[in-house]
Amino acid sequence: MADNHQLVFSDAEYEKAAKQWGKEFLLMPLYSCMETLQYMTGMPGTRYKVALPTVEGNAQFAPYRSNRRSNDQTKVDFREIETFFGNVRIDFEPNKQIQMLIGQSAAFLGDGQAQAPSAKTVIASVMKSLGAHLNDALFTAVRNPNGDTTADLFNGWGTIIDNEIGDGNIAAAKGNLLTLGEAITSANAVDIAKEIERSCDPHLRGLEKFLFCDPDFADKYNDAYLLTHPAVSYNKQYEQPFVEGSSKKTTIVPLDCLAGTDKYIVTPKSNILYGYDNMSDLETLEVKRYEPWVLTIAAAMFFGCQFYTIDKRFFNVVKLHQ
């Protein structure tokens, strides 16, 4: 194992690493959320409010006529994705961080191959730890400019949905809201999944898309699938990733950060967005020493969530039975 007593980095080395790899460090919280964000679409370079246009026109081909001229009434709808500027100041003990990294390396590679961390990996591990709080808040965060946590920084996807339901923009009459009439169990989960699939607009049904749900639904769906398909030849594995009857176009995506949710979401990857910057000089990261034994990371970054559209052709919300 590497001798951590020999790993003593000067303050100048930490400060140099922070300057040299600052942009990469600011992406670490996002990287640690990738089990969730891999199913969403990132928008780098997004600062504050950015308009998302959706264009529809009435012009269309028709039987030939030499004087034909379409009266095109082009309609442009806008949604806005807003990223919010947040910062963090976190103290860490380099020696403890080094010992942890050496221990992780030894566990993975074996004592004889343990790798000595660099100042870069020490800072990266601290920044990555911030991502756990971000992941927890992706759906539930509520913007509070006076708050002190990641859950106060932005409006999560679930909060956006709640606001749109309150405004009447997501509703059964709009074709983008299904309210289940019964609680989900291990006996009816497959039938409910089919109900969700068939409630979607025909255009949405034809798209490759995800059913974002809590892990409990995925467990119950798998249990129900085994009960309802005991003799089907292709039922060779316990986990069934696709909704039955969707022609493998709807993938079930259970997310830890949706545990306890009262709503599921059906939408393509291209429609569920998260914005961040990582391009401008407004985002910063520096490492300084203000106390013995302890270093301080000060960082600032942008983050926000949105749906490109809530049109029923691309989006459906499932409200669970309470």
Image: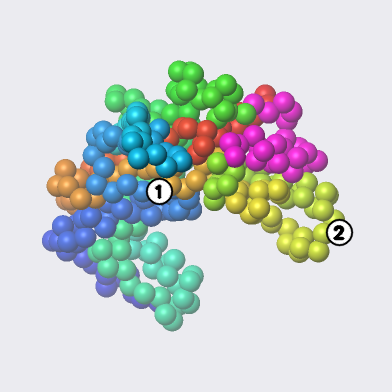
For label 2, the SS is loop
The verdict on residue 8 being magenta is no
- The residue to which callout 1 is attached is 41
- Whether residue 262 appears in this view of the structure is no
Q: Is residue 93 left or right of residue 168?
A: left
Q: CA distance from mark 2 to mark 1?
A: 39 Å
Q: Quadrant of residue 322?
A: top right
- Which mark identifies residue 146? none
Does residue 223 lie above or below 59 as drawn? below
Which amino acid does the dot numbered 1 rest on? Answer: Thr
The type of colouring in the image is: rainbow
Q: List x then y, in percent, for residue 57.
A: 38, 34
Q: Residues within 10 Å of mark 1 (few under 14, many from 20)?
A: some
Q: Position of residue 127 (x, y in %)?
A: 32, 52
Pick the residue in front: 80 or 286.
Answer: 80
Residues rendered magenta in the picture: 179-202
Residue for badge 2: 231
